[in-house]
Image (spheres, rainbow, N blue to C red):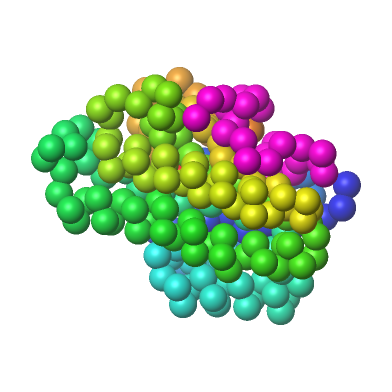
Amino acid sequence: MSQHTALVTGGNRGIGLEVCRQLGRLGHRVLLGSRSESAASRAVADCRKAGLDVRAVTLDVTRPDDIQAARSFADEQFGGVDILVNNAAILLSENTSILEMTRDELVATFETNFYAQAAMCQAFVPGMMSRRYGRVVNVSSQAGQLAGMGTYAPAYSMSKTALNALTRILAETTRKSGVLVNCVNPGWVRTDMGGAHAPRSVEQGADTIVWAATLPANGPTGAFLSDRKRIEW
Ligand code: NAP
């Protein structure tokens, strides 16, 4: 298998860090995106101790300057990014009713979970299309699935539904260009976000993300995936 350059946002902890490890173990060069330099250094040191080709990239996904700097770094050093994992996200006001949610909570959630992912795709996907190879994985959630939508975490849930729509539109835009774009529900995972009582390990949560990040040319595009299978929207 050829080595690709992967960029993982929010790679310093949780599911993102495990995605970095698993992509590294598959032999890929991993750019571990983190908004905190110190958190990135610690995570990268751990990965490198295990012999993985993982490097830190300072990247707050809500900062356009950081996104442009990450793109320039990847272009100049490695000829671009082949695999983009949009993993970074925030979960605010999990138990607030949609009738009480503030505009600030809604805006902050969409800034990180949706506008930033759109900006990341705009920065990295054109290069993938011109090189005729790319894999984009938008880390979504069952909370964003319209089919089962309830009252849980309204701002977060709606931001993930919007991310799913972005996935569909981008998949059509890139069809037949060598770029595959999918979104993945990792399930309920034991991380800072998922909490200690979640049933899944980070290894299980990262599995389908890494699978979608390394699909063969005839793999799916524009799909919502969970446990390596399509699920409904
Ligand atoms: P987590 O432990 O809370 O980690 C979130 C990561 O996102 C951290 O690295 C955090 O960085 C980063 N982040 C947040 N805002 C950022 C920003 N503006 N710029 C760059 N990085 C930023 O969450 P997780 O459980 O690993 O979740 C990873 C993904 O899986 C998310 O997309 C989440 O919605 C999804 N997901 C998780 C679960 C679950 O049960 N855990 C379920 C469904 C979906 P800092 O360390 O700097 O804060």
Image location of residue 218, percent across then percent down: 82, 39
- Relative height, residue 165 to residue 199 (above, below): below
Q: Residue at x 63, y 78 (%)?
A: 72
Looking at the image, residue 64 lies above or below residue 119: below
Q: For the view shown, which residue lies furthest in the left direction? A: 100
Task: Give the x, y percent position of residue 196.
Answer: 37, 28
In front: 69, or 192?
A: 69
- Classified by dominant secondary structure, the portion drawn in magenta counts as loop
Magenta stretch contains residue 210: yes
- For the residue pair 82 and 60, the one nearer the viewer reads as 82
The picture quadrant where one finds residue 141 is: top left
Indicate whether 45 appears above or below 147.
below
Residue 147 image offset from top left, x and y in percent:
42, 24
Closer to the camera, 200 or 46?
Answer: 200
Q: Would residue 132 be counted in the magenta stretch?
A: no
47, 220: nearer the viewer: 220
187 sits to left or right of 177: left
Residue 214: x and y in percent read 74, 43
Query: Which residue is painted at 56% across and 40% down in the image?
Result: 183
User: Is 31 left or right of 111, judged from the image as shown?
Assistant: right
Residue at the spot x=41%, y=29% of the render? Answer: 146
Q: Residue at x 34, y 53 (%)?
A: 110
Per the rendered image, the range of residues in magenta is 209-233
Query: Residue 123: in sight, yes or no?
Result: yes
Q: Give the answer, above or below, for where 159 lies relative to 194.
A: below
